Each structure stands twice: as C-alpha cells, then as structure tokens.
Amino acid sequence: MADERVVRAGPSIVVCDPSLTERDALAVFDAALWDTAGRPLDERTGRGAVRVLDRGDGRWILRHYHRGGFVSRFVEDHYVWTGLGRARSIREWRLLRRLGALGLPVPEPVAAHVLRRGPVYRADIVTRFLPDTRPLSALIDDGTRLDETWRAIGRMVRRFHDHGVEHPDLTAHNILIDSSGQVFLVDFDNARVRAPGAWTEAGVARLERSLRKVALETGTRFDEHGWRELVLGYRESDPEPATAG
C-alpha cells in the first residue's frame, strides 16, 4: 500500500507510516527498550499484555496479542501464518488508520509487528496513549458520576455502527473516557467493516452484558438510568450511511 512502509529484518516484519525510516520502524519494537524503559499499564484495556513507554512526544502503548477462549489453554500467543495482510496486528493497524481518517475516536496507530517462524507468527501493535483517559469499567468501580457521559457513550457507539464498524469486544473495558467527558473506543483486534445488519443490536446487547458484569464484579449497582441514557444517545444520533469493504 502506498500510504505505509513495510520493513523486513529477518523473521520480523513491521508496517508503519512512511514517515518512519526503516531504522526507526524496527526500533519501535526493540525488546530491550520496552523491557528497560517500559512498564505495565496500570489498567488493562483489552486482552493480552499491555505496556506503556514514556517518550518526549508523549506515550506509546505496546500490546502483545494473546490467544483467547479455549485455544488459549494450549497456545498462548502463536497464530497460523496465512499472509501479511491477514496477520492480526497488521489488520488492526490498517483499520485504525482508516477509522482515524474518518475522524472516529480511536487511538493513533504507530506501527504493527509480526515475528514469523515458519507456519506461525507472534504479533504486537504500538499506538499512541490517549492522555488523561480511564476505562469506563474503572470509573464505575470508583463510583464516578457519569451523568451526561452515558449519552455520549451511546452516540459514540452509534458513530462506529453508522460507519459499518463491528467491534467484537464492545465492553466497558474498551471504552475510555477523559476528564472532559470525551469518549474513545480501543482494542480493535478482529474488528471489521461490514454491511448493516443484526450485528449492531448484538453489539449494544454485548455492552449491556459487560456493564452488568462489571457491576457484579465490583459490587456496584447496575445503573439503569445510565443505561437508558446510553440507549437514548445511541438512538438520537443522526444516522450516517454505513460502509462495507
């Protein structure tokens, strides 16, 4: 693709913005750098190991891809290689670039990495840290009053759905909110753009289940009023034509 750089060095392949040199692209995933200067993120925003690195121009977030579900009992972080374009980190990086260009509230992707060993690979992605944000689940646990933020969450989800974006893990852990009430969505592993369908209702239902689960796990009360406000925000948004591809 013309708007990206692909750098190959032995078993490693990095995809990044063409503004990065080959040397800088490889340096993004320097294991020694992350081991010495990086630190675990205090609040996880999705499945897998997440680390944060302070830089002069802000912070970077490194997420290593881990298997989920039943397969994770036997395979921790290896995936079958079926081509660069189908690697999980590459697909997510390209999707984030696409969604960012649409003005949707997603983290800015820095680079994606795969380490191929024959028929299998491991993967990582680096994005820019969204400053002054916390997961919705953590705010609920703290007892933070969300008030009008509930409706903003609904409007945010609707924006993604109007653009045909199906997020397979639409949960309270992957919705981030900053101190001004701005809402973001993160962790687009296995997300896709598709034609309108019943998946939109399924996504909203998944979010409700997640919120009820968070309330149960944290010993807080499920906010019925907040949920109604969220649904109102979702329904009141002006529909935009969904896209597929």
Image: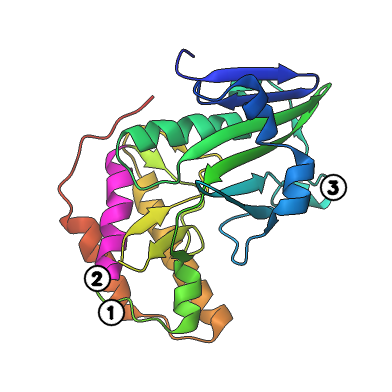
Q: Is residue 155 magenta?
A: yes
Mark identifier at residue 229 = 2
Q: Residue at x 51, y 63 (%)?
A: 173
Q: Position of residue 117 (x, y in %)?
A: 83, 25
Q: Is residue 45 magenta?
A: no
Callout 1 crowding tier (Cα within 10 Å): few <14, some 14–19, many ≥20: few
Mark identifier at residue 74 = 3
Give the dominant element type of the magenta stretch: helix, strand or loop.
helix
Q: Secondary structure at mark 2?
A: helix
Q: Residue at x 59, y 66 (%)?
A: 43
* Callout 3 touching callout 2 (CB < 8 Å): no
Residue 126, above or below 59: above
Q: Please state the extent of the stretch shown in magenta in the rendering.
A: 149-163
Q: Residue at x 79, y 28 (%)?
A: 120
Task: Identify which residue, 49 or 157, lies in the foreground.
Answer: 49
Residue 43, above or below 7: below
Q: Which residue is mark 1?
A: 225
Three-letter residue code for mark 1: His
Q: Position of residue 24 (x, y in %)?
A: 63, 28
